Image (cartoon, rainbow, N blue to C red):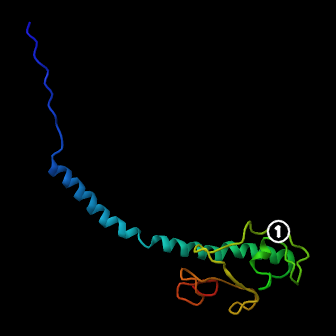
Amino acid sequence: MKLKPITFEYKAFTLIELMLVVVIIGTLAALVVPRFTGRAEQARTTAAKADILSNIPLALDLFELDNGNYPTTEQGLSALITKPTIPPLPNNWNGPYFKRKPVDPWGNSYIYVSPGTYNKEDYDLSSSGKDGVEGGKDDVTNWQD
């Protein structure tokens, strides 16, 4: 009985096939990446809106429910974390209403004014947005959509 030698056939991708795959991946990336650019800024704006229209107002409403009024401008949002020492002193402070001082997604403090200039019955709450300058078109406020 005569044994046959074992031979191996190598099947590999050719350079053209590899280049074709790279071109396809590059084309897909060129289509997908632009769809995600700008989303980070949109997400920051959405987070600021959620804070201004929901999260912080909830804490402010709890403060007002306990004490009969919102914190003054001088007391600021810090009144939600520690009991204010600036008059009018909240006699029924039952905080902290927030774990830490809220900052906007760009790392700036929220702007709080009470009584408000725009919302005269309660307070104005805003973020100066990406540019950090109050009054820009990137501002997020509780008085305009």
| Depicted 24 relative to depicted 128: above or below | above
Q: Nearer the viewer, residue 109 or 126?
A: 109
Tell me the quadrant of the picture where the C terminus can be found. Answer: bottom right
Q: Residue at x 77, y 75 (%)?
A: 78
Horizontal side of 40 relative to 142 (left or right) equals left
The amino acid pointed to by label 1 is Gly
| Residue at the image position 70 percent from the left and 93 percent from the top | 117
Instruction: Give x and y (percent) for residue 96.
Output: 80, 68
Outermost residue to the left: 2
Q: Residue at x 78, y 69 (%)?
A: 97
The total number of labels drawn is 1
Find disc 1 in the rendering and name its residue. 95
- Say which quarter of the image contains residue 132: bottom right
Q: Residue at x 31, y 62 (%)?
A: 29
In the displayed structure image, the side of residue 122 where residue 26 appears, left or right: left
**Quarter of the image where the N terminus is located:** top left
Q: Estimate the x, y position of residue 133 in percent, counting from the top left.
A: 58, 86
Element type at mark 1? loop
Q: Residues within 10 Å of mark 1 (few under 14, many from 20)?
A: some
Outermost top residue: 1
Q: In the rendered image, which quarter is residue 65 located in?
A: bottom right
